[in-house]
Image (cartoon, helix red, strand yellow):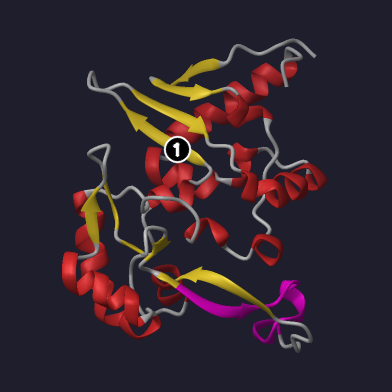
Amino acid sequence: MVKLPPILEVGGILISSDILTEKFCCDLSVCKGVCCVEGDAGAPVTMDEIGEIEECLDDVWNDLSAQAQAVIDRQGVAYTDQEGDLVTSIVGGKDCVFTCYDNICPTPDSSPDMGGECAQPIRCCLCALEKAYRAGRTHWCKPVSCALYPIRVKQFADGTVALNYNRWKICESAIAKGKALQLPLYRFLEEPLKRRFGETWYQELCEVADELRSQGYL
């Protein structure tokens, strides 16, 4: 296979080429949502997203831990980290304040929602914001930076936007599942990429990937 340049430009946005080459598919039954717990800062958010979170707060409040509620009462739903970025508030220097815990079924077709019985539910860390959205209690899901992970968005002072693939040991199960399914990272994150950059840009990304594949790069 021909070696691909490390950085590509698609629609005026710089992207790391491994976003096209690497396989990835979250496997919640294995990782148990640990990405919402591990780390030393919250999830990047915009001012608009902080407003959305605050509107959802009453609907998710009872799903949050007492420690998370105390942090939000003290400093709000977000803070400015050491790099000067707005991020969601965290508990004890790691857990996002919007983490909550619930059981999931390892195979969706055996879940109660599908008319089956979950014989061996798995306890997982979930996002209280997304949980409320999926239950129809709110109109907004979660910060786009969370939905895009493991892609990280970086905006430079000159306005240039770059997308990088953030490799993290806790995502090894997602890499294994992605390889088993032969699912490229950019395909796995189709919906959040469209949400952040639009349908037209995502279609251009797919066309670039298809052209590179035809040339033997992928």
Can you say which quadrant of the picture contains the N terminus? top right
Residue 150 position in % (x across, y down): 53, 43
Is 51 rendered above or below residue 116? above
- Identified at 19% across, 51% down, the residue is 47
Q: Is residue 179 left or right of residue 22?
A: right
Q: Is residue 158 left or right of residue 101?
A: left
Front residue of 194/50: it is: 50
| Residue 136 falls within the magenta-colored stretch | no
- Identified at 17% across, 70% down, the residue is 74
Front residue of 93/187: it is: 93
Location of mark 1 (residue): 152
Say what secondary structure mark 1 lies in: strand
Residue 39 position in % (x across, y down): 46, 51
Front residue of 90/143: it is: 90
Q: Amino acid at mark 1?
A: Arg
Front residue of 50/200: it is: 50
Residue 31 position in % (x across, y down): 65, 60
Is 87 rendered above or below residue 156? below
Q: Which contiguous range is marked in magenta?
A: 100-114
Residue 205 position in % (x across, y down): 53, 28
